[in-house]
Image: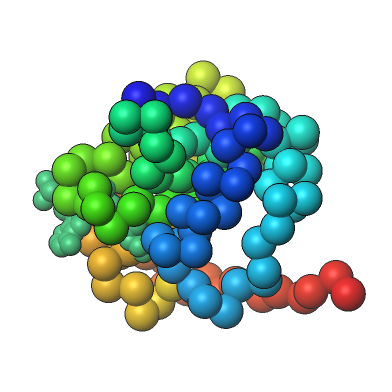
């Protein structure tokens, strides 16, 4: 079952990301940050459930201009069963309904496994772009 995450899913999401998300160098996750996301856009965080257990996530960020996908994470127990592909399809439907014209996905350069699913879903790397970041202290 695929559905938007709610505040009661936050502990399960944090636990999932401990074991399944890419990028150890990312800023620490916290319940407060996820709650902020859900308050800002209750449909943004899509999750997959199996037997009542949260097994996968995908954040689909829409700001009215750009459509971003990130935090695609599927629990190791249920990989290679089409769950990731299903979440991407749901996010694409959501973006289409919102009027987005193009989607981008954050994928680490060295994440060969991550790259396989984006390629399979029709996404193409844009080597002319790099991400520039500045932490807000
Ligand atoms: C990458 C990840 C999200 C894939 O999720 P998944 O549910 O196992 O993927 P799916 O079963 O939907 O696979 C969809 C397609 O992706 C590709 N793919 C996924 N896993 C693959 C693997 N281990 N080897 C080769 N291709 C793979 C295949 O093309 C697959 O289609 P197919 O099964 O018909 O061949 C999952 O492995 C994961 O959470 N990895 C750690 C976190 C991560 O790297 N996330 C991506 C961030 S950019």
Quadrant for ligand 1 reads bottom left
Q: Residue most toward the top?
A: 97
Residue drawn at x 36%, y 80% as measured from the top left? 110
Scheme of image coloration: rainbow
Residue 84 occupies quadrant: top left
Residue drawn at x 46%, y 53% as measured from the top left? 16
The answer to whether 84 appears left or right of 72 in the picture is left
Residue 74 in the image, given as x and y percentages of width and height: 35, 51
Image quarter where the C terminus lies is bottom right
Near-viewer residue (37 or 16): 16
Residue 40 occupies quadrant: top right
Residue 37 occupies quadrant: top right
Residue 6 in the image, given as x and y percentages of width and height: 62, 30
Residue 107 in the image, given as x and y percentages of width and height: 43, 65
Q: Is residue 20 above or below residue 134?
A: above
Near-viewer residue (132 or 59): 59
Residue 129 in the image, given as x and y percentages of width and height: 52, 71
Residue drawn at x 21%, y 41% as measured from the top left? 82
Image quarter where the N terminus lies is top left
Residue 92 shows in this picture: no
Residue 93 shows in this picture: yes
Q: Is residue 53 above or below residue 15?
A: above
The answer to whether 112 appears left or right of 8 in the picture is left
Near-viewer residue (37 or 104): 37
The answer to whether 95 appears left or right of 27 in the picture is left
Near-viewer residue (129 or 86): 86
């Amino acid at each position: 079952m695929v559905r938007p995450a709610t505040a009661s899913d936050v502990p399960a999401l944090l636990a999932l990301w401990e074991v399944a998300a890419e990028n150890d160098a990312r800023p620490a996750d916290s319940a407060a940050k996820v709650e902020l996301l859900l308050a800002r856009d209750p449909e943004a965080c899509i999750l997959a459930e199996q037997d009542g257990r949260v097994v996968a996530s995908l954040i689909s960020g829409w700001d009215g201009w750009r459509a971003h996908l990130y935090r695609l994470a599927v629990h190791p127990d249920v990989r290679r069963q089409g769950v990731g592909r299903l979440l991407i399809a749901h996010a694409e439907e959501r973006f289409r309904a919102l009027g987005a014209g193009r989607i981008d996905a954050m994928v680490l350069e060295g994440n060969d496994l991550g790259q396989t699913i984006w390629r399979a879903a029709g996404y193409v790397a844009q080597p002319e772009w790099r991400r520039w970041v500045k932490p807000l202290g």
